[in-house]
Image (tube, grey):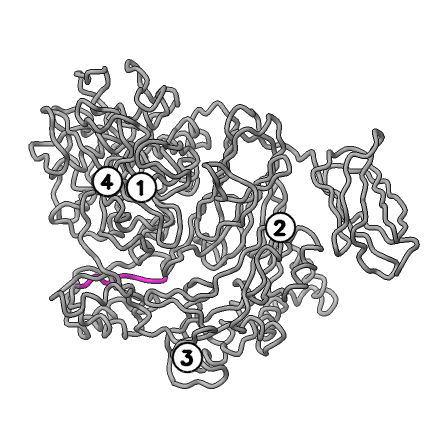
Amino acid sequence: MRRSFNRSRAVVFPIAAIFMFAAWLSFVGEPQQAQLRKSERLYSVGKFAQPDQITAEIRKPSNDLVHVPISSQSDRARVLQLGKIVNDFDNFVIAVGDESVSEERYGEGAYKIDTDIHLPGATFDPMKDPPAETVQPGTASKFGNGYYVVQLGGIATDDVLDSLRGEGLEVIQYLPNNAFLVYGDATSAAKTAENSRVRWVGEFSGSNKITPGLLTARGKARNATYNIAVFSRADLDNVASEIVSTSGGEVFGQMSLQHSYFNVVRIAMSPDQLERVASIPDVLRIDSWVRPTKEDERSSQIIAGNYSNTTTIAAAGYNPLSQFGVDGTGVTIAMSDDGVSIPGNGGFYLTATNVIDGNLRGSTAGATSGHGHLNASIISGASPFGVLDPTGYNYGLGVAPKSHIVNLPFLKTGYTGTDADAANDAVTTAGPNTVLGTISNNSWGNGLNSNAYDSLAATYDGLARDASAAASVDPLLFVFSAGNSGASGLTRPKMAKNIIAVGSSENLRTELEPAANNIDDISSFSARGLAADGRVKPDVVAPGQGITGSRAGTDCSGVNTCFDANHSFSDGTSHAAPQVAGAAALFTQFWKTLNAGAKPSIALTKAAILLTGQEMNGIGATSALPNGAEGWGRVNMKFMLNTGAAMKWVDQNVNFSSPGDNIVYTGKIVDGTKPFRVALVWTDPAAAVDPALVNNLDLTVTVNGNTYRGNVFSGGLSVIGGSNDTKNNVEQVWRTGDATNSPVTITVNAAALNGDGIIGNADVTDQHFALVAYNFLDAPLTNFNISGRLTSAAGRGVAGAVVLLSNGGGVVAATRSNSFGYYIFPLVPGSQAYTVSIRSKRYAFNSQNVNLGSSDLNNINFTSTQGSP
């Protein structure tokens, strides 16, 4: 069913359901409604059983698939001149046409869709380079059940996916591009290869499950450790036993993941056994695994935006966060690190009043080397030490000093829990404030992998959506350090889509770190992106160089140094991440206060933080935002809390269930002297491989008639033109210089729904989202479109005619009809009367008087009264 949402009222128009209801009344009457729905689904299966005129086109090697925005019938007519329409969703179509036709010819915003299939161990276009695993249509070449890849010839819709299920296949997981992993027998796979909307079917073989880099270790290493992703439909214990018997390896961990298409077996084995293990049917993919490693009040001033220039922060003497009216009260953060001591040295900053031990899982209480303890104090440091630094600041006051910490010694010797255990403990353990955790700080990394998306990233994408092992759905915002590997890339699992990965900028603390002298400099060690599939990573940066905080015990091996009895000092993205976790705690408190205790979604918190990005211009910041060094910039909470600007928040209260679903928010820019920003974020389902986007939403913002698409930037600001982003689950539009009261429309559109974006309902291809707009006020749209078509008496479109729009003061606008006879006057002031008149050399038309009220007039059509046919 297709839904269309109009303006901020989010009214639903179930058009398809109306037609189905009318047909049902005509034929069978009210008591048959339940049967009709079933037969309609069966019909949907059957209607793709035989090839049609589209089938040959989508399978032709020399053809491309093209996504084309549609705003008028003339757009659709232009597409049909260039190719055939595979999918039609009213506001966009998927077309198939010859690869020689450029995107520009299809129209503004059109883009070609990649038809390669991406698997962990292979990338190929099955029509241009058919692999040996190809299943021939009609006749099964083998017997029994197995896993297959089915690529569609357009984007997925419910009826096409139902047609696969109707052939007896279980649809498991989306694969890029426009493909799905399925399970079933060989006969069903061969029958599916005949489906008119299926481009290709092939076996999912062992050679496709291993990333090429892993195979280089064969014969070189005696043993290595691997994460083996196993399809969740299989019995995990049985598959683990089969892996051991096949490889001779030793299992030392298993993870069962909620709402996931895979579980994990962690095993030590010889690299020479990789191909044998990959040949086990229930194995999804194999990735290397290494043990995770570790990666002050002045810095709080920087992320609070309290600085006069890049080398001078505001004077001490007051709480830098008091301006925001929040301090973290009622918020609990899990610290997954090497331990937190209760209390810290001298009883300052971290005590039993704001820290509690979580499930230690075989480890011991207390800090090990000061790393986790310092990070906890960066977030929640309170009860400050009386002695101040040379400029009057406290060495250990946290960003959110009234928030509480749950100590999870994930990096500490003896800890036996898994990633899933730590996530579950975070959301099921209350701080001393009796509030369960909603944020998890993770200042560690699991090795490098060229910024690729792997099963560990997919694990955290799933845990972010539901971290609990119980039946309840308990999201958890993971804040990670980006890593200290510089140009070598981010450490794992920082390519996860639903986390916040934080790079490091400099603090201002030259007395301890002479290099920490300019807040616009990016630390040289801070890990660089972009992601391998082009996504923006890291997400943001915060001060991580020259950071001070609380000290625990005498072991200072996890920090740079302990410079007095009560304080430590360190550099690293490890200490940038808790700055952002603290900011997330402040926003959480703010939102709960505003919404009767309701927690913000992790998507909303992420959107609120990423919208605050401050462009940096110092050392290491050579490219305009967004980029792979600073992501969306340095956090500046003045764009998030007590902003002094009109704000709009949307928190997952709109559900998209079909491609083409959309919602439009109308309003205006309140203050032309301030920036205008919009951030869209959604918690995307876990992916299987790069490119990692599963559900694709599009952000489009129109300001004063100019259209800006999400993430189309130049010089750090949004620009007109370009096409919609198809990589990120974060899209932003940033503008400056638009006048006060400039009219704005914000549109969110579902471009593709390939996975289960909303846990807990029956729809397995759906998505909700969060949106934050800065300097925006909801208001009814005051400008509207007048459009229509000119035709001859014979019904042909009349091209090149001059169309005039006038009111009592004379002509206010003029345009020409296009080659199909269509015309449009955009953004005409409403609540007025107008006259539309036509000037044509060959045809005569009568003028029309129209009243433009508070909505578009889209069918002001003219038929010639005389002239050529």
Is 260 one of the magenta-colored residues? no
Measuring 46% from the left and 73% from the top, which residue is drawn there? 128
Which amino acid is tagged 4?
Phe
Which of the marked residues, 4 or 3, is nearer the chain's N terminus?
3
72 shown above or below 129: above
Residue linked to disc 3: 185
Secondary structure of the residue carrying numbered label 2: loop
Using the image as rendered, state which of residue 493 and residue 525 is in the foreground. Answer: 525
Which of the marked residues, 4 or 2, is nearer the chain's N terminus?
2
Which of the marked residues, 1 or 3, is nearer the chain's N terminus?
3
Q: Local crowd at mark 3 within 10 Å, few (<14), some, or many (≥20)?
A: some
Using the image as rendered, state which of residue 265 and residue 712 is in the foreground. Answer: 712
Residue linked to disc 1: 479
Residue linked to disc 4: 525
Mark closer to the observer (4, 2): 4
Where residue 829 sits in the image (x, y, percent)?
A: 73, 33
Chain part drawn in magenta: 261-267
Which amino acid is tagged 3?
Asp
Which of the marked residues, 3 or 2, is nearer the chain's N terminus?
2
